Amino acid sequence: MARTRAASLLLVAALSACATNPAPRRPSPNLPEQVGAAPQAGKTAVAPPAASAPGIDQFALQELFKRLTDVSFMTQLGSEMIIRKITYSGADKLPIPAYFFAPKDTLRRHAALIFVHDGIHSDLSDVYVPHIRSLVREGYVIIAPEYRGSTGYGKDFFDAIDYGGKEVDDVLEARTYLRDLVRYADLDRLGIIGWSHGGFITLHSIFRRPKLFRVAVAHVPVADLPARMRTHSTGYQQIFSAQPAFGGTLLQRPQPYVERSPVSHVRELETPLLVHAASNDDDVFIIENHNLRDSMVAAGKDRAGLYHYKEWIDPPGGHSFNRIQTREGLESWNETLAFLRRYLSPWRTLRIGG
């Protein structure tokens, strides 16, 4: 296959051309070709191998595997939709790379989604191929920002991380790109969806700019930073304390952790929001989403019809339960599609100028 040949060439280049530090492995589960379908041979997610040998520079390796992911997206989806790798202006005019996926019918206006990838220091992986395919088939235009701190774009971009701060503005500026350059994106029908850290950004986006969005979906979202700091390792906490906006640990400077926690902003919810969580999540422990749920209920957001929550009890995959091939994963995804349809009516494709 072309993808296999490209993978081999890039891997050889990575191992021969990179130069100093070992690269950490970024786990990325295999997914079937379609949600609800059996896996097909060779259709696996791109994930960098653990680089145990010395002499490999992690940032150069990340860039090479980002190119491999680009090839994977094009190989798997390029025949059935429009795919582009774009760059737009984010917060402070920082160039933000992004993926763009759209139906081939550009003579009609389509509902649009901002699709936010998971992970601190991560990037859009091809584990999301089934989800992107499903959404484009529904009729959505998708833009998936690689906000500051994402991997695959060099050390300076990696070090620009601003958790809960400018990264949210980077994602919000994706709408400006759609407004200015994609005439067939109907921004009166704009939604946002994200997983894990992408769910965290999704929550902040609708709190910060509620009028932009008709609907939002946050899967296993990071929701409560003080709780997260108390339940995660010292090494993980250092990712936050080293950032200028935090300027120390939770004990040293609690205020930024509270201010950048979605749970602190529930009264600002104006956008219909669906949250799916897993009781056995070993990354975003369920206490975070219980705290978010209880705060939403106390604020009356469930009674107002704005907050919708569902928790799966011990689903296979835990944190990744709706990104793998299981009954629970398919159930979660089908409920997500139904929720988006309710507010965005993706089948309503008006002719441009009509």
Image (tube, rainbow, N blue to C red):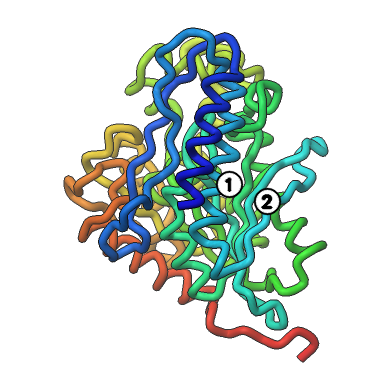
Image location of residue 352, percent across then percent down:
76, 84
For residue 35, side relative to residue 99 (left or right): left
- Looking at marks 2 and 1 on the same chain, the residue that comes earlier in the sequence is marked by 1
Question: Percent position (x, y) of residue 315?
Answer: 20, 49
Question: Can you say whether 314 is above or below 94 in the image?
Answer: below
Looking at this view, is 66 or 175 the one in front? 66
Can residue 23 be seen here? The reply is yes
Residue 163 circle label: none
Q: Image height check: is 162 above or below 331?
A: above
Q: Amino acid at mark 1?
A: Asp
Compared with 326, 7 (above or below) is: above
| Callouts 2 and 1 close, C-beta under 8 Å | yes
Could you say which disc has been placed on residue 85 in the image? 2
Percent x, y of residue 159:
65, 21
Residue under numbered circle 1: 70
2 vs 1, front mark: 1
Local crowd size for mark 1, using a 10 Å CA cut-off: few (<14), some (14–19), many (≥20): some
Residue 227 lies in quadrant: top left
Residue ranking furthest to the left: 314
* Residue type of the residue flagged with mark 2: Lys
Q: Is residue 205 above or below residue 77?
A: above
Where disc 2 sits, the SS reads: strand
**Residue in the image at 40% along x and 22% along y:** 50
Residue visible at 40% across and 50% down in the picture: 219
Judge by depth and name the residue closer to the eye, 223 or 43. Answer: 43
Q: Looking at the image, which residue is at 63% across and 66% down?
A: 82
* 224 sits left or right of 334 in the view: right
